[in-house]
Amino acid sequence: MPNKVPITINVNGRSHSAEVEPRTLLVHFLRETLNLTGTKIGCDTSQCGACVVKLNGVTVKSCTAFAVQADGAEVVTIEGLAQNGNLTAVQEAFWNNHGLQCGYCTAGMIISVTEIIERNPNPSPEEVRAGLEGNMCRCTGYNNIVKAALAAAAAGQGG
Amino acid sequence: MFAAEFEYRKAGSIAEAVQLLADNPDAKLLAGGHSLIPLMRFRLARPELLIDIGGIANLRGITVSGDTINIGALTTHAEIAASAEVQQANGLLAEAAGGIGDPAVRNRGTIGGNLAHADPASDWATVLTALGATVSAQGPSGSRTIAVADLIEDAFATALAENELIATVSVPTLAANQRAEYAKMAHPASFYAVVGGAVVVTMDGDRCTAASVAVGGLTPRPVKAPSVEQALAGTTLTMDSIADATARLSDDLSAAGVDIIGDVYASADFRASVAPVEVKHALLHAIGLAHH
Amino acid sequence: MTTRIFGSGIRRREDPRLITGQAAYTDDIKLTGMVHAAILRSPHAHARITGINTDAAKAAPGVLAVYTGADIEGVLNPIPCAWAIPDSDLKAVAYPAIASDTVRYVGDAVAVVVAENRYQAEDALELIEVDYSPLPTVINPEKSLDAVSKKKQEDAPNNQAFHWVAAGGDTDAAFADAAITVSETINQQKLIPNPMETRSAIASWSPAMGELTIWNTTQNPHIARFVTCLVTGVAEHKIRVIAPEVGGGFGAKIAVYPWEMITAFCSMQLGVPVKWTETRTENYMATTHGRDHVEYVEMAANADGKVTAVRSVVYAGMGAYLSTAAPGIPTILHGLMYSGPYDIANIKADVYGVFTNSTPVEAYRGAGRPEATFLLERLMDKVGDAVGIDSVEVRRRNLIEPFDNNRDVAIGITYDSGNYSNALDQLLGHVGYDQFRNDQAHERDHGTFRGIGVACYCEICGLGPSQVAGAVGFGGGLWESATVRIYATGKVNVFIGTSPHGQGEETTFAQIVADEIGVDVDDVEVVHGDTDTTPMGWGTYGSRTTVVGGAAVALTMRKLRDKAKVIAAHLLEADEADIEYADGQFFVRGAPDRAQSIQDVALQANVAWNLPEGIEPGMEASTYYDPPNFSYPFGAHAAIVSIDPDNGHITLDRYVAVDDCGPQINPMVVEGQVHGGVVQGAGQALWEGAVYDDNGQLLTGSMMDYAIPRAHMVPDIEVHSTVTPSPHNPLGVKGIGETGTIASTAAIYSAVMDALKPMGIGSLDMPLTPERVWRAIQESGYTGNGHSHNHGHDHGHGHQH
């Protein structure tokens, strides 16, 4: 049996150390070891984006990274967005605009939209859609997700 | 979707990675992981050892010196797409990088890993072939330069020795009178290129003085199109001359002696037939005859 | 009076847990001592199992047990089918949870491993040795029926699962007399539903209590409990099924599957909780698919385009076994809707249910009605072409006149209310139909190919009267129940039998409650999805939750209001007849300032210190609501597409929907249902399809191959509505969950064929891939003018071009 590997990952501002099998996916480490189950597994093949988290400041598909690769890194998951119960502008916009139905894709969607707006504070609808090409939703037809993203961007601009 | 067991080693330097490769014939390099990890999760790849090169700092980064852009193998597609230097020196590089996969994939996937994987549907292989890019391969006895056109030998097969890794990708800058574009028909599920056509044209007014054309996606490795290039060179580029030139692509595909890929989504016949269309679209965009 | 809460697009009350990652879906749940199951699935579409050796797997690290078909024999009963269509010669073949002698599709269970963790379970699967002797395979439903020599389902000679005919009028005579007849062959390709959450179950057996608890990603926990009882032999009152947060269903979570029965079996054998969760690849093999019809359809019309008859012969693939509700889909939910919104005097549906060596077929969003709408709309277009009138005009000539209370149609059902021409008129105005036709004529001269497609639909929802359910062979009722409890503090719990999973009824049902009894919507909590805490209900599918379950809630509130009125009269020392109710206040007529609020009354009812004679303590009531009829939502949708003739690429440029689901409780939720439904239907038209090779291997076996619409592939969906209340529903509501899917496939397909009209292209199979379109253009002899600027590349990347 292969040696377990010691890793330390900062998740949502807290440092976690563990010994993991090298084959443990980052998403499994988050869900099974840390019990942060807000990050979902949808496709297993890096298409759907349900597992998107931030790794060292950029979005990644946590089903396509081994936990050992995140040793020493900073990870932010959906659980780490709202601070002291205050929703982020993106979370608030998803709520206000019915940007979710079953909620399964929502964690990945919110984190991806957050990055879209960080990179482009005033995106067009087309830019939002292009930015979401790696996130699947089967419920909303994307309409209200795009609307939520635009609303969050507008909120960030002060109005 | 649970990988088989493997040993894991983190390489601190290129030399260490090369040594580990030499010592472990069943080892694989792990960079961004976007090519390898899905295969491992299907248990279609089951290396005994993964050598993580992700922490080797000097495999990362972009520098432009003279008429060459040097890109560290671990540079992500997103970093290339967002690089002001790259956008300035070779807009096609940035544009192609920004069209690979999706944002999260681009944040993680690397140019070196993409080339080493040699997927026939790789955008990089086609684009870098048309651009005349080279890679620097590091092995136990030093480094050697390989043209990307020679690096990709077949589907998932490269000219790299078992104990070599790609350290740098070097791409010529574009001159002021050069235009370069890439057009692809993307698979609607995977976004991989069903057919991709990359062009670089050197212009004197509206006359093309030289052209470099490559197609990919439909062939196991990118195919250069000398017949199309020759037809373009010395020609004033118009709708008609472009259509005439791209019609010769079938000669180049025949001459290359490669099989045309066909699958459940797009047959070989269809791919071969629309390859000239993609090249045409790239050319029209390059000279500003197409609108978005 | 303030804005009425019924009809307000308030934001959803379920969302806070979903946008913060706090919601618990089945795979998010961990129980103490829980172990993990992984299922070994047949790699063959049809084969005899000639040997199986599990010794190495049993000895693998972490493995607790390995079970095969032999182990479940006599312990787990076969999986039953719950919809036995009468008078159809239906053959219910044995559907074992684990195959012991024959596997019938790629994905059939052969063995299960239970291990301490999932990685170990997967490792051990590789160590099980199975010897197979392959048998002939059939995938196409029509060919399967023909393949007598390839007899597959031994209990069903000729692979025929059933044969069902429904007719009204004299179809043969109408065709014989017709001035015009048109026909079409339609392949309703097999679709993979793809809820974002794959299926998952956790079973926990308590040996001491003899109780089985199953957390199950299901649309219908009460049906799941009923069937679990039949399969496991555990008595119904000793089984608790919990549907926690459920990540989409679309029909794929209706069926009661072998997999959760296997999970339960493992827990009962080992005495510890067992979790099983599908991978996506496993989901594509093992979770039910949709559609899969081969249809031969015909329409007869007068010379002016008035349709006189429609008939079909349909070969409906059932897959390898009959899934829970499968036989009802191509029959009751399909054949009975052949009139659509049209006045057609003679109708005949002739449907064969056929076994194939592929994943079982079940309801998939729309379930039978998209197929019915598609064939009607396709044939309408063809009648229009044959007569030489515009596709909208031919529809207009055939729409049923407006009616507000019951209209019989020839196939033998009664629509509740409809104003179909109004929906069509609204649509044409919103989309700018006439302007588009003018523009299109000019564009065609310049080598640009755009098309418009209009689909009118009427569908059957709100399933349904239980007596009818029984008469058509459904193995249960179709009523719904609600229990509402108002506490001493004035807060309200609503316990419902249906089981929403994304449709927003935690909000919309709270709006019903708030509207009926004047409490704040935030004072209402809707409880669902747990058979131990909720009253019986038949689940969420067929756009029935709000129509039937919502009606049960409304009627319950009216009972509570009546009781409150009696108590209020007592407290106000007035005669009940003099008590008025408004906005949560009870008062003597003319004296609203001396009111008793519903909260005041609830407190008194709960403490019972001073109740009128004969009035029981408590503020709780229940309703079991059995609807007198189905509901029939309707509407008209339009799609506009453009096509690049160079490479066959289609761009969906615009989509406009007009739907009528009756009064809308929450317009924001209604619109969301339409958006999602439309895009799913677009998926069938343009991108989606399960493709098998001749050996029954699924070639579109992952999300890398099976193309689901993404954000950049679809436009903004423009949503409008008309309001025609259902006369028989207490809220007037009709249902909205499936309308988008029912109309959009037909509208988009029609738009594509309209764009291709100059090339004279007759018909194409779905999905309309670039290659299919390009090939048709090539074969049409169209050469173009070489100057097309219409570079519609999808490329997935707007910035690529």
Image (cartoon, coloured by chain):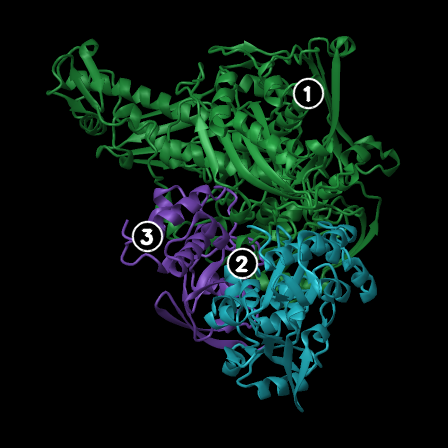
Chain colours: A purple, B cyan, C green
Q: Is residue C520 above or below residue C463?
A: below
Residue type at the position of mark 2: Asp
Q: Quadrant of residue C547?
A: top left
Tell me how far mark 2 sits from mark 3, CA to CA.
23 Å
Residue that label 1 marks = C86
- Amino acid type, residue under disc 3 in the picture: Ala
Specify the subunit that label 2 lies on.
B
Disc 2 to disc 1: CB gap under 8 Å: no
Q: Is residue C1 left or right of residue C300?
A: left
Q: Position of residue C358 (x, y in %)?
A: 73, 42
Question: On what subunit does the disc labeled 1 rest?
Answer: C
* Residue C342 percent location from the top left of the image: 60, 16
Q: Which residue is mark 3?
A: A89
Q: Nearer the viewer, mark 1 or mark 3?
A: 3
Residue B270 position (above or below residue B50): above
Q: Nearer the viewer, residue C725 or B49?
A: C725
Closer to viewer: mark 2 or mark 1: 2
Q: Position of residue B50 (x, y in %)?
A: 61, 76
- Residue at image mark 2: B102
Residue beneath the point at 15% across and 19% down: C571
User: Observer-nearest residue: C190 or A145?
Assistant: A145
Point out the residue furthest to the front here: B205
Q: Nearer the viewer, residue C691 or C399?
A: C399
Q: Residues within 10 Å of mark 3 (few under 14, many from 20)?
A: many
Taking the image as drawn, is residue C691 in sight? yes
In this orientation, does residue C67 appear? Answer: no
**Where is B204 relative to B244, above or below?**
below
Q: Is residue C648 left or right of residue C734?
A: right
